[in-house]
Image (tube, rainbow, N blue to C red):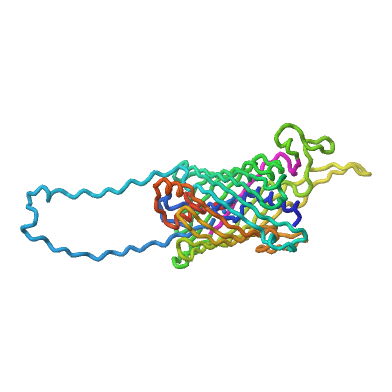
Amino acid sequence: MPSSFRFLLCAALACAGFLSPGFAASRAQAQDAADAGTPAAPEGDQAATGSETTEPSVEAPTATAVAAPATTTAAPPAEEAAAPDDPAAEEAAPAEEAPPAPPKRFWRNSLFLFTPSVTTHSFSGDAQLTYNPTVSLNFRLVPRFYLTDTLFLRVRQDLNVEVTNSDFDTYARQPLLSDTFIDLMRPALVNAGGFVLTAGLRVSLPVSIASRYNNLVLGTGFLANASYQIPNESLHLSVLFDLSYTHNWQSTNTPTFFNDANSRGDGAATICPGGANGCAAGGFTNVSDALLFGPTLLWVPDGEKLNISATYYWAPRLGLPLGTQSVDTATGSVALTDSATHWRVLQYFGVSVAYDVLPWLNLSATYGTFTTQLSFNGKLRNPVWGPDTTLSMTAVVTLDQLYDIVAGESTDLTPEQLRRIRNGQAAAPSTGRAF
């Protein structure tokens, strides 16, 4: 895949908000039982992520209470029984007081993720016409700030470093920031019968090079996540669905090249024909609207710590049309308009296996591929294999759980609650998920 096309593809994925290694732990789905006060129900860049990782969760089986057999105790002899006027006999034994519940931290359910990844073609020098190995490291911080028990702000910030020679940076192993995503989430809008719906509003800030290249001013949109636990406790199976929409507000409809000096705002721009401040880049126009939606199937074989998931996402994006251009011909001036369809469709497929190693640490391995739906010759691409298919490992750290253990204030949580926190479902991405 040519490096210029790879740049545009990756820029598009970043704008869509789901370019994140592993696509795990970034999906925001539903409300955590610990915060909602209801039984645990089944989030990115994700999913992350990121989205931008991330396994959606399933409802933990309800434990069946078993009554203890009644024990018969012989009555004490009459001479040992307390007299009716004995004050000790009239005093009731004081009830044992339960320890007070620890206060909820306003930054609870915050996550840190570390994901090293490698493309499958890195292992074969003749897999492509031009050998282009890719080994990268992704660092993702997803803090949460609870405004109320049922409303919180979630911020996602990624930093990527390619260990191999990169197609996208200006010097070797340059740290690259992704766009900053800020979500206002309302978990468990619907929570009944194993079905949970979560929704929120999103704002994206143009921090990445790709967004500045696309003249992005601001991105606004919404996201929603639904999950449903199949009503068979022995299966431990859930189906989840993610949906997000983003509208990009841009100053121009085409990408523009600026040099580093101009990007710092000191007025020194690339010299362009006609003295324009920046040169229009050829190829795709900027994306005005981006959708992402698709299902995830989650299986928890042991009902507790092991999670296996498969995800498919479909991501149509609408490119801005070119402006009307007046062209002088032999018969006079002709106005050329852009009437072509500008829908561009991306797709992602991933399979992940994750395990809760510790209450605050989850490790996962992911096979994932993203590509355009159509190849250059107009044929459908294989959704499960492509030149940028990746193998990745992700470590997900639940920061408040780690803090509580270090501070000696650890709170016991069920595997279901931990899974929901990791997946962005605790009140309420992953991705994020997600995304």
Residue 309 position by quadrant: bottom right
Q: Nearer the viewer, residue 349 or 412?
A: 412
Q: Residue 353 location in percent, x, y?
A: 54, 62
Residue plotted at (7% across, 49% down): 85
Residue 101 seen in render: yes
Q: Is residue 252 magenta?
A: yes
Is 345 above or below relative to 206?
below
Q: Is residue 374 magenta?
A: no
Q: Nearer the viewer, residue 328 or 155?
A: 155
Is 108 above or below relative to 74?
above
Q: Residue 135 location in percent, x, y?
A: 66, 55
Q: Residue 83 location in percent, x, y?
A: 7, 52
The region drawn magenta spans 240-257
Residue 51 seen in render: no
334 lies left or right of 223: right
55 lies left or right of 368: left
